[in-house]
Image (cartoon, rainbow, N blue to C red):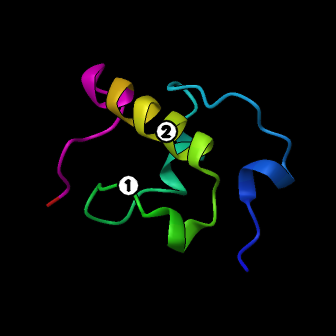
Amino acid sequence: MKQNFLSQNKVTYIDYKDIEVIKKFVNPHGRLIARKRTGVSANHQRQLANALKRARFLGLMPFVVR
């Protein structure tokens, strides 16, 4: 079983401005990595998805990496 990075570091809320944390869960093409591969909980996965969408909208992260 994979270790949950977010639970290990006692992260309760994933902020869209914290790009270093979000980048750990994004593949080289800029897409969010599945829960099976990262080992995060369903709640954290939803928070990650929302944070990634907000960061993309504000231009903090790219939509597509070429």
Q: Cβ–Cβ below 8 Å for labels 2 and 1?
A: no
Distance (Cα) linking label 2 and label 1 = 11 Å
Above/below status of 42 relative to 1: above
Q: Nearer the viewer, residue 7 or 17?
A: 7
- Tell me the residue that label 2 is attached to: 46
Left or right of 53 in this view: 40: right
User: Where in the figure is residue 40, as x and y percent of width and height?
Assistant: 63, 57
SS at circle 2: helix
User: Where in the figure is residue 66, as x and y percent of width and height?
Assistant: 14, 61
Q: Residue at x 33, y 66 (%)?
A: 28
Q: Nearer the viewer, residue 46 or 56?
A: 46
User: Where in the figure is residue 46, as x and y percent of width and height?
Assistant: 49, 39
Instruction: Specify the segment rendered in magenta.
Output: 55-65
Left or right of 3 in this view: 17: left
Mark 2 vs mark 1: in front: 2
Quarter of the image where one finds residue 56: top left
Quarter of the image where one finds residue 8: bottom right
Q: Residue at x 33, y 31 (%)?
A: 53
Disc with the residue nearer the chain's start (2 vs 1):
1
Above/below status of 43 relative to 34: above
**Furthest-bottom residue in view?**
1
Q: Amino acid at mark 1?
A: Leu
Quarter of the image where one finds residue 59: top left
Above/below status of 48 relative to 66: above
Q: Amino acid at mark 2?
A: Arg
Residue 3 located within the stretch drawn in magenta: no
Left or right of 62 in this view: 8: right
- Tell me the residue that label 1 is attached to: 32
